Image (cartoon, grey):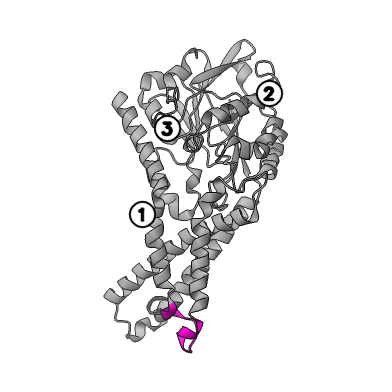
């Protein structure tokens, strides 16, 4: 079992390494590829291309500059609301990703057609513009990238979809039937998510008057002094059960991004200040009539590798005190951590529902297959027969980095127990 946990921790660490080294492995070759694809040899003009050389070159340099300064907006020029330069820069990252994907796709398709078909054949003349004409391919790649990004921007400008899920829990006490949990995941307060977006989310959730509100990680991407004003609307969240949770307490569990920015303890202090209690390998018990609901939360899978003292994923400690007769709900950020818990069958048998996030549903279409195969659970409701445990993975309220997401990808989950 210990070996499994270590393997999963290494797996999570590898995931963060991919993010941290992407500029060297992906961005630099990507820059060279984009420059080659849109060099002066591919001028749109029929006259001497050197006459217009400065314009396409300058456009490419400006675009790549915007892409590569995007990470600075996580540390500089951060305010209560996103600034226009951060939005443009991080949106450029999305264009960059889609552009390289479509350029590579067209290069591959072009190569295949050249190998298989004789392009001079009259039967394939209609394919020449799309396949044989390099300029057409590149223009089409740009258009596709822009269309996909604009569609993704439109999704993030819309309010999150509210999904109402009903879960039938075996032997649920009669008094607990109809109990509701609002699941929030991946708020990612930061350079492209500000106060107004969080306030709108709060207003939406409060309309449903949930019994409990659970935040399953990745609250913010930055430092508390920079982002606390943007996060303050969270203090206006209310839940029905104020008996045990004071005025309607929220139950968050910390995600990998809190550790990535190296300020998780500062966020703990801030959360407590606004009446949000982090579940740092512990649980809270709610008395409902003569029965109890035990809500447990564990540190992120990445916690141990972050080298923060006292931070490690310890789900057994988090569940300590949750009785077999309790309805137990577990909050854990990453689906790969869910797999570890469910592999411990004897422990997991006492968990009725696990709430997770992290995947963003892929966030961008090009990443959907990678995220799907990378994570033990991708999105939506799952049921583990061996333990009798339900798992719900949210695609998240917001997004990380570029303000772009797949269709219907932002969501608030309202879970009703029956």
Structural distance between the alpha carbons of marks 1 and 3: 23 Å
The answer to which of marks 1 and 3 sits earlier in the sequence is 1
Q: Per the image, is 122 magenta?
A: no
Secondary structure at badge 2 equals loop
Alpha carbon distance from label 2 to label 1: 46 Å
Tell me, yes or no, if residue 211 can be seen here: no
Q: Which residue does the image show at 36% across and 23% down from the upper left?
A: 344
Query: Mark 3 and mark 2 in contact (Cβ < 8 Å)?
Result: no
Q: Nearer the viewer, residue 210 or 252?
A: 252
- In the displayed structure, does residue 199 sit left or right of residue 188? right
Residue assigned mark 2 = 248
Mark 2 Cα within 10 Å, few/some/many (few <14, many 20+)?
many
For marks 2 and 3 on the same chain, the one whose residue lies earlier in the sequence: 2
| Residue at 68% in and 21% down | 241
From the image, state whether disc 2 or disc 3 is nearer to you. 3
151 versus 208 height, above or below? below
Quadrant assignment, res 305: top left
Q: Quadrant of the N terminus?
A: top left
Instruction: Give the x, y percent position of residue 155.
Output: 60, 53
The correct choice, above or below, for 203 with respect to 149 in the image is above
Name the N-terminal-most of marks 2 and 1. 1
Could you tell me which secondary element the residue under label 3 belongs to?
helix
Which picture quadrant has residue 9? top left
**Residue extending furthest toward the top:** 290
Which residues lie in the magenta part?
A: 40-52
Dots 2, 1 in contact, CB < 8 A = no
Residue 188: quadrant of the picture: top right
């Amino acid at each position: 079992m210990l070996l499994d946990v270590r393997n999963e921790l290494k797996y999570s660490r590898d995931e963060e390494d991919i993010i941290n080294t992407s500029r060297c492995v992906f961005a630099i070759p990507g820059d060279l590829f984009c420059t080659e694809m849109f060099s002066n040899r591919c001028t749109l003009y029929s006259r001497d291309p050197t006459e217009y050389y400065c314009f396409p070159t300058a456009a490419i340099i400006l675009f790549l500059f915007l892409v590569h300064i995007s990470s600075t907006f996580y540390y500089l020029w951060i305010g209560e609301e996103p600034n226009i330069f951060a939005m443009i820069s991080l949106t450029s990252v999305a264009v960059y990703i889609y552009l390289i994907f479509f350029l590579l796709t067209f290069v591959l398709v072009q190569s295949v057609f050249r190998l298989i078909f004789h392009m001079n054949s009259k039967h394939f003349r209609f394919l020449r513009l799309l396949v044989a004409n390099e300029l057409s391919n590149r223009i089409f790649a740009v258009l596709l990238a822009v269309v996909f990004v604009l569609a993704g921007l439109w999704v993030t400008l819309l309010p999150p979809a509210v999904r109402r899920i009903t879960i039938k829990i075996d032997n649920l006490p009669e008094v607990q039937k109809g109990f509701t949990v609002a699941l929030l995941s991946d708020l990612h307060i930061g350079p492209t998510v500000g106060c107004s977006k969080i306030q709108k989310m709060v207003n939406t959730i409060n309309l449903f008057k949930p019994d409990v509100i659970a935040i399953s990680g990745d609250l913010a991407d930055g430092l508390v002094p920079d982002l606390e004003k943007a996060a303050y609307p969270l203090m206006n969240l209310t839940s029905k059960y104020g008996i045990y949770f004071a005025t309607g307490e929220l139950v968050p569990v910390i995600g990998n991004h809190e550790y990535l920015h190296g300020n998780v303890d500062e966020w703990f202090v801030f959360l407590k200040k606004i009446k949000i209690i982090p579940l740092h390998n512990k649980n809270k018990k709610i008395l409902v009539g003569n029965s109890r609901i035990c809500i447990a939360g564990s540190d992120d899978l990445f916690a141990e590798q972050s080298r923060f003292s006292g931070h490690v994923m310890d789900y057994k400690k988090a569940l300590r005190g949750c009785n077999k007769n309790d309805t137990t709900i577990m909050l854990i950020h990453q689906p790969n951590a869910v797999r570890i818990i469910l592999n411990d069958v004897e422990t997991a048998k006492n968990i009725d529902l696990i709430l997770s996030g992290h995947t963003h549903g892929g966030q961008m279409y090009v990443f959907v297959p990678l995220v799907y195969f990378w994570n033990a659970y991708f999105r939506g409701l799952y049921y583990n027969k061996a333990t009798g445990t339900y798992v719900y993975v949210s695609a998240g309220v917001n997004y990380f980095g570029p303000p772009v997401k797949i269709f219907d990808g932002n969501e608030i989950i309202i879970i009703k127990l029956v």
